Image (cartoon, helix red, strand yellow):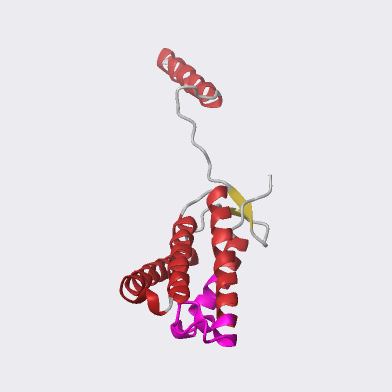
């Protein structure tokens, strides 16, 4: 009996020692990159969780809508308003890039998202202003005409909300 207890004690001590040793045969797992939110708490470096999923869904809808609209306009009546329809195609590309980059994790995708949203905001502001100031140059509507008026101003609000989301989910400085 004492022999069994001694053997159990020896096995228990040996397993404790082994658990303290670094295991070399296990594959290393990488922890997700983190960043600091304004509260100082670590935040996962993904932008596709919580409200980010809704943001990505809205961008996806705009990507599909702008692509379909631009494709139809370019295929059927491009000669009527080539600038407007080219801008619609450009907006579609920006929405596609924003959708994909917001859904992906990592610092590089964060940078792509940031550029896409800044380009979108600038596009909405410039095209919105020009479409009001010089309506002759924009005889037909684009997604960004009138600051996105035809879409309930969502094209104006979306990059602002997106940039705030990116700011809150920014990668930590190394």
Q: Is residue 172 left or right of residue 157?
A: right
Q: Residue 80 at x, y = what percent?
A: 39, 80
Residue at image position (64%, 59%) is 37
Q: Is residue 4 left or right of residue 76?
A: right
25 lies above or below 67: above
Find the magenta span and give its range.
130-159
Q: Residue 28 at x, y = what percent?
A: 49, 31
Residue at image position (34%, 69%) is 71
- Residue ranking furthest to the top: 3
- Looking at the picture, tell me which residue is in the foreground, 89 or 3: 89
The tally of labels here is: 0
Residue at image position (38%, 70%) is 61
- Looking at the picture, tell me which residue is in the foreground, 163 or 135: 135
Q: Is residue 174 magenta?
A: no
Instruction: Give the quadrant of residue 26.
Output: top left
Whether residue 52 can be seen here: yes
Q: Quadrant of the C terminus?
A: top right
Whether residue 48 can be seen here: no
Q: Quadrant of the N terminus?
A: top left
Instruction: Give the quadrant of residue 41.
Output: bottom right
70 lies above or below 11: below
Q: Residue 75 at x, y = what percent?
A: 32, 70
Q: Is residue 140 left or right of residue 137?
A: left
Q: Residue 172 at x, y = what percent?
A: 65, 50
- Looking at the picture, tell me which residue is in the foreground, 103 or 24: 103
Q: Is residue 143 magenta?
A: yes
- Looking at the picture, tell me which residue is in the foreground, 61 or 129: 129
């Amino acid at each position: 009996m004492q022999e069994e207890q001694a053997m159990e004690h020896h096995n228990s001590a040996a397993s404790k020692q082994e658990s303290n040793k670094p295991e070399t045969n296990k594959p290393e797992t990488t922890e997700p990159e983190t960043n600091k939110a304004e509260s100082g708490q670590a935040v996962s470096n993904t932008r596709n969780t919580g409200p980010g999923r809704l943001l990505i869904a809205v961008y996806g809808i705009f990507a599909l809508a702008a692509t379909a609209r631009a494709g139809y306009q370019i295929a059927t009546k491009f000669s009527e308003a080539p600038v407007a329809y080219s801008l619609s195609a450009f907006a579609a590309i920006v929405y596609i890039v924003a959708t994909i980059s917001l859904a992906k994790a990592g610092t590089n995708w964060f940078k792509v998202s940031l550029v896409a949203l800044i380009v979108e905001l600038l596009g909405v502001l410039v095209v919105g202003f020009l479409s009001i100031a010089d309506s002759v140059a924009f005889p037909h509507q684009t997604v960004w005409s009138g600051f996105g008026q035809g879409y309930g101003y969502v094209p104006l609000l979306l990059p602002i909300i997106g940039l705030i989301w990116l700011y809150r989910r920014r990668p930590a400085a190394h």
